[in-house]
Image: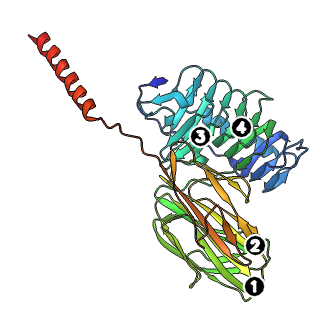
Amino acid sequence: MVLLLLSVPALTQTAPNLGQTSSFAIVSDTFTNTTPGTVVEGDVCFTTGPVVAPTVNGSQQTPCPAQVGLDQDSARSELDAQSCTPLGAAVALDTVSVGGGPPGEFPPGCYSSTGAMSITTGGTVTLTGDGVYIFRPDGALNSGANSRVMTANGACSDSVFWTPSGGTTIGANAAFVGTVFRGTAAGLSITLGDSASLEGRALAYGSTVTTDNNVIAVPQACAEPGTGSIIVEKRTNPQGSPQSFSFTGDALGVLTDGEQIVLDNLAAGNYSSTESVPAGWQLTNIVCSDADSTGDLGTATANFVLDAGETVTCVFLNTQDGATDGTITILKQATPSDTGESFDFSGDLGNFGLMHGEFVVETRPPGTYAVSETVPAGWRLDSASCDDGSLPSAISLEAGESVTCTFSNSRAALGVPILSQGGIALFVLMLMMVAAVALRRST
């Protein structure tokens, strides 16, 4: 383990102005995608596009606007001009202890190395605290397979920046956060391995971005200190219905299937939103990402309980009269909630990962469905239940029904060794011997 006995840097880093790049998940000259499973939440631009088209929930532009390239370079220059805490030569970030803290845990700041930066296979880097994070390796950036970069205690993915001088490789099944800039020389690419995820941006204007069954999502803007956000989301059964739904209250507006009302920079407190249910439809469920927030089907109202720095989403699920399918929602709750840990699920609804407060909504024909969770190391599954009384291993879905199954996990407590009576006696004897030796030396 590399032990850096240094205090948190006194200098405060600042986030750059990303300009037109801010809405882009992928900026590239050549965009290569090898499998159809890649999903991009954000804008994409390229000159040479992929043979296998990914799912892009955003705009696609060919080629990238020149201003995007200028803004990428300007943001990179802003980051490179900031003072950093040197970590030494080539370094594995998950082995670094800043100020004697836990290995792999970093407070806000700028960190540099004179060689490559890496995260070892299966390693974890935790960014903890509200602020800006800059990692500047004078070499390649490599995150090993099954590695993770997580945010905690107010850290925000939109304030994390990686500026290597070399190429970047994010390993298979890795979970990575932050905006990644291509290397400073032309042709230095950004590559994501099979099933890796990136909550951030891959900015490689003039170079190559390679994906392989990945999820890349532009992060939400960081909340102002002491504020939070509420989101009202609409889902319908059947999916894709053009029906409009009106909302009143703190979050007001008109939504169709898949759309959201977002209120940012709200003070901590209680908020509400009420739906006007159209004729021919039923409000069959309200699912909120936060355990303190609730939905009342009788009044068609979501009641948000918002803490400082929190984002709470409540989904209104409506079913059209005569619908032949039902909906299943899988909701994840974790304690503590701010670790950034992702939990993998598999079963009849497919394979997916969820962090605390996240959920998936699936429309399925009537039948019995099974969903299971793979519990990560260091965690335990406290409960898994469905609101219709079904077990997650046998979810019984009827036509027009909405079922929500919640998986609740908590970090496993470290075991505390308990001494037997013989062990206690031996321990006391050892203390007596140490005391005797110390007394003899003093005399």
**Crowdedness near tag 4: few (<14), some (14–19) or many (≥20) residues, C-alpha within 10 Å:** many
65 relative to 128 in the view: left or right? right
Q: Position of residue 176 (x, y in %)?
A: 64, 41
**Crowdedness near tag 3: few (<14), some (14–19) or many (≥20) residues, C-alpha within 10 Å:** many
Front tag of 2 and 4:
2
Q: Amino acid at mark 1?
A: Asp
Q: Which residue is mark 3?
A: 149
Q: Report if the CB atoms under discs 3 and 4 are less than 8 Å apart.
A: no
Residue plotted at (70% across, 35% down): 171
**Crowdedness near tag 1: few (<14), some (14–19) or many (≥20) residues, C-alpha within 10 Å:** few
N-term-proximal mark, 2 vs 1: 1
Residue placed most toward the observer, 292 or 68: 292
Image mark for residue 337: none
Please tell me whether mark 1 sits on a helix, a strand or a loop: loop
N-term-proximal mark, 1 vs 4: 4
Instruction: Please state, as top left, top right, bottom left or bottom right, where the C terminus lies in the image.
Output: top left
Residue placed most toward the observer, 158 or 118: 118
N-term-proximal mark, 3 vs 4: 3
Residue 277 quadrant: bottom right
Q: Which residue is mark 1?
A: 321
Q: Position of residue 290 (x, y in %)?
A: 52, 64
- Residues at marks 1 and 4, CA–CA distance in whole angstroms: 44 Å
Front tag of 2 and 1:
2
Front tag of 3 and 1:
1
- Residues at marks 3 and 4, CA–CA distance in whole angstroms: 14 Å
Please tell me whether mark 4 sits on a helix, a strand or a loop: loop
- Residues at marks 2 and 1, CA–CA distance in whole angstroms: 15 Å
Residue plotted at (59% across, 40% down): 149
Residue plotted at (69% across, 45% down): 197
Q: Position of residue 9 (x, y in %)?
A: 45, 33
